[in-house]
Amino acid sequence: EVLESDIAKIDEKISNANKVYEENKAEWGSQLDDLRKEYINIQDRMKIKMKAGAGDANIEIARKILNVLDNYERAFGVVTPETDEEKEVEASYKDTYSMILKQFEDIGVKQVQTVGTEFNYEFHQAVMMRPDEDYEEGMVCEELAKGFAMEDGTLIRAAMVVVAA
């Protein structure tokens, strides 16, 4: 009997709480739904802004590191290792260079395609034109400096190229 009376009291409290809940839901429900929708919209806007900010930061970092990569490429073109020790040093520099390129890929930076592609003023900067038997007119026949862009197509630096005339 005591147990049944306790259960009855609890059931009454639950039904009273459900009544209050339903009354408040009727009064405030639409406003709560609007607040939930606005909260979701704010979260979506913040995600978009965060991605845009990260992309801008990646571009800025890539532009600064490109100077370092250019120095590596110039050094690889000029220095010829002769001894085994020099070859080991060159190999370690090439490993570092490859690691930087890998990190670029990881943050969404890719190299602009050049030699053998049609000249594209959005990604290529024509330094000169010259006749070339291997390529048709308007095709890139030589790359003087690498170009880089984000995966979404945002240009970081145009590739300096020679175009077949």
Image (cartoon, rainbow, N blue to C red):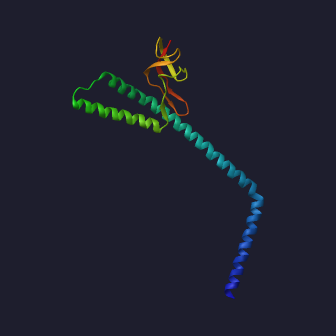
Query: As displayed, is residue 122 above or below residue 19?
Result: above
Q: Position of residue 92 (x, y in %)?
A: 30, 34
The x and y percentages for residue 65 are: 41, 30
Q: Is residue 47 above or below residue 72?
A: below
Please tell me how many numbered marks the rendered image carries. Answer: 0
Quarter-wise, where is residue 98 in the image?
Answer: top left
| Looking at the image, residue 140 lies above or below residue 153 | above
* Residue 8 or residue 127, whichever sits in front: 127
Give the image location of residue 71, x and y in percent: 36, 25
Q: Nearer the viewer, residue 39 or 64?
A: 64
Q: Which of 128 and 117 is in front in this view?
A: 117
Left or right: residue 30 versus residue 119 is: right
Residue closest to the eye, 113 or 20: 113
Outermost residue toward the front in this view: 134
Q: Is residue 36 left or right of residue 125?
A: right
Residue at 45%, 31% in the rendered image:
62
- For image coordinates 34% across by 32% down, the residue present is 94
Residue found 71% across the figure and 76% down from its top: 11
Residue reaching furthest to the bottom? 1
**Residue 43 location (% of width, % of height):** 61, 47
- Residue pictured at 42% horizontal, 37% vertical: 102
Quadrant in which residue 19 is drawn: bottom right
| Quarter in which the N terminus is drawn | bottom right
On screen, 152 above or below 158? below
